[in-house]
Amino acid sequence: MDVKNVRATDFATACKQDSDCVAVIEGDCTANRCANAAIHRSDFQRYRQTCTGTRDPLAECRFEVGERAICTAGRCSAEP
């Protein structure tokens, strides 16, 4: 997997409720920045095996990597 171009769709994204979802970094997932996508909790360990980025310490993030995201229309999302 190309860590400079990771997509949430590389992982499970189907959900039934918010607690199914965790926030992740899409794109360069080795960078320290705010989460901008979400995947199903069951795939988070696989995501972490590749992606090491965490929160940007200077940024105000709506979602941080590993925090619960939201389930919208059956898909995990980091969008409001």
Image: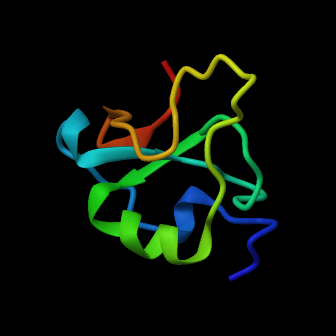
Q: Residue at x 60, y 76 (%)?
A: 50
Looking at the image, is 73 positioned above or below residue 61? below
- Residue 72, horizontal then vertical, whole percent: 35, 32
Quadrant of the snapshot with the N terminus: bottom right
Apparent side of residue 16 relative to residue 54 in the rendered image (left or right): left
- Residue 71, horizontal then vertical, whole percent: 31, 35
Looking at the image, is 69 positioned above or below residue 29? above
Q: Residue at x 75, y 23 (%)?
A: 58
- Residue 10, horizontal then vertical, whole percent: 55, 70
Looking at the image, is 26 positioned above or below residue 10? above
Apparent side of residue 19 relative to residue 28 in the rendered image (left or right): left
Q: Among all residues in the image, which is located at the extreme bottom?
A: 1
Examine the image and state in which quarter residue 57 appears: top right
Q: Residue at x 60, y 22 (%)?
A: 61
Marker count (numbered):
0
- Residue 32, horizontal then vertical, whole percent: 73, 46
Apparent side of residue 40 relative to residue 30 in the rendered image (left or right): left
Q: Residue at x 29, y 43 (%)?
A: 74
Apparent side of residue 49 relative to residue 30 in the rendered image (left or right): left
Colour mapping: rainbow
Judge by depth and name the residue closer to the eye, 49 or 12.
Answer: 49
